[in-house]
Structure formats: structure tokens, C-alpha cells
Amino acid sequence: MEFSRRLILVCVACAVWLSGCAVSKPHPSESQQPVAVTDSKKIKLDVSPSAKRDYDRALASIRAKRYDQAERTLVKMTQAYPTLSGPYVNLGMIYHRTGRSDQAMEALNKAIEINPNRPDTYNQLGIVLRSTGQFKAARDAYERALHFDPNYLYAHLNLGILYDLYLRDASKALDHYERYQSLLPEQDQQVSKWVVDLKRRTQKSKKTKTAQKQQL
């Protein structure tokens, strides 16, 4: 069970459009596939139809794990449209998935420099920081995502896993798991099992501490 949570924390991220995070119904079992559905707050940008088609193909390549192909397209887009943060966020995802953490953080920090208000960028940065063992910095990144969007599903899920497995704070882990669940149209059964398991472990720990005190 812990292995599955670690895998999800590594993989949970959304591939984004040229502006604004794209969100559909998320589920941990789908987290290895980037989400590419426009949201209601998408901003119209001055880019050509051909550029939009190239971008869509890059997202399709990410889903198909053709990272080299997606990377080439996105790098060209950062050169043609240097004021757009979306290509940098997706490059950060590609670099992370292909084991280039330093380049991932560089791309994500560039995205933040261009647009410091995107929760998806901070969420992806948190994933990279967590993977390099920088747990407190990862927490700060996820919390920054929630600063800009308190209902950002992925940040709640990732914070829950981070507190559960790495920072060992059961209370905060439960808070974020339950917040994540409350934002879904229907309960995520896998996370529901984690909540039950975490509550069971927490109760067992309390009983053990009580017994130890009584023995003293």
C-alpha cells in the first residue's frame, strides 16, 4: 500500500494548456496519464492555430510517453512564445519523468517567473522536490499551490501522501486526504482505503502509548 502511494506521488501531475491548469475528474489510477482538458478559466492567447495544433500533439506525445518528441516541440514553443508558462511546466514534467531533476526544477522555476500564480506549476515542483528528498520544500510548494487555489485536488492528494509517508504527520495527512475526497464528485475508493488504514494505525499507536504509560 505504501508503494502505491509513493508511485502516485511521483506521477500525479497535470499536463497543461498554454494558460491555466486543465482539470478533469482525477483518480490516482489515472495519475500517470497527463490531463489535457481545458478548464472554464482558459485565457485566449495570441498564438497561431498551427502552434495550438503543435501543442496538442506535444500533450498527446506526453500521454504516449514519447517524451523526446514532446520535448522537441515544447522547446521550440518556449523559443517562439517566451512569455507562455505552459510549455515550461510540461517540460518540467518531461525532465522529471526522464530523470533530469535539475532541468525539471529550472524549467518549473522559469514557469513561475513568467506566471507566479499557477497552482499546477507549484504542484509539479513539489513532485520534483519530493523525489529528490527535499520533503519540507515539497510541502511548501504544495501549500503554495493551495494558496492560489484552495481547491486544487492534486496538491491536497500529494500533501496527504507527503504527510503520511514522509513527514509522518497522520493528522495533517488525514486532513488533506479528506479534503481531496470532498472535492471529488464521487469518493476515490483507493484513497478511502488509505484513510481507513491511517485511522487504524493512528488508533493503534494511541493504544500502544497508553499501555506504555500504564506500565510505567
Image: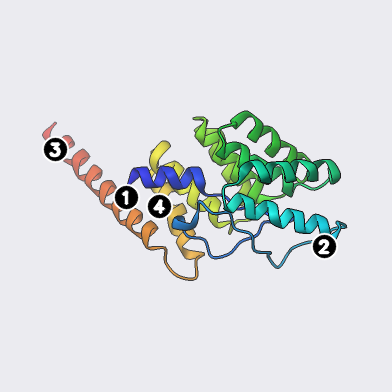
Pointer 4: what residue?
174
Percent x, y of residue 189 = 37, 63
Dot placed on the residue nearer the N-terminal end, 3 or 2: 2
User: Which residue does the image show at 77% across and 39% down from the upper left?
Assistant: 113
> Quick check: marks 4 and 1 in contact, CB under 8 Å?
yes
User: Image quarter for residue 195?
Assistant: bottom left
Pointer 1: what residue?
198
Percent x, y of residue 78 = 79, 42
Q: Alpha carbon of mark 3 to alpha carbon of mark 2: how far? A: 66 Å
User: Which residue does the image show at 27% across and 47% down from the upper left?
Assistant: 201
Q: Nearer the viewer, residue 196 or 5?
A: 5
Q: Nearer the viewer, residue 116 or 30?
A: 30
Q: Nearer the viewer, residue 71 or 10?
A: 71
Let me know if residue 116 appears in the view. Answer: no
Pointer 3: what residue?
214
Q: Alpha carbon of mark 4 to alpha carbon of mark 1: how far? A: 8 Å
Percent x, y of residue 122 = 63, 44
Which label sits in the foreground, 3 or 2?
2
The amino acid sitting under disc 2 is Lys
Q: Alpha carbon of mark 2 to alpha carbon of mark 1: how far? A: 44 Å
Pointer 2: what residue?
44
The amino acid sitting under disc 1 is Leu
Q: Alpha carbon of mark 3 to alpha carbon of mark 1: how far? A: 24 Å
Q: Alpha carbon of mark 3 to alpha carbon of mark 4: how far? A: 28 Å
In the figure, is residue 21 to the left or right of 54? Answer: left
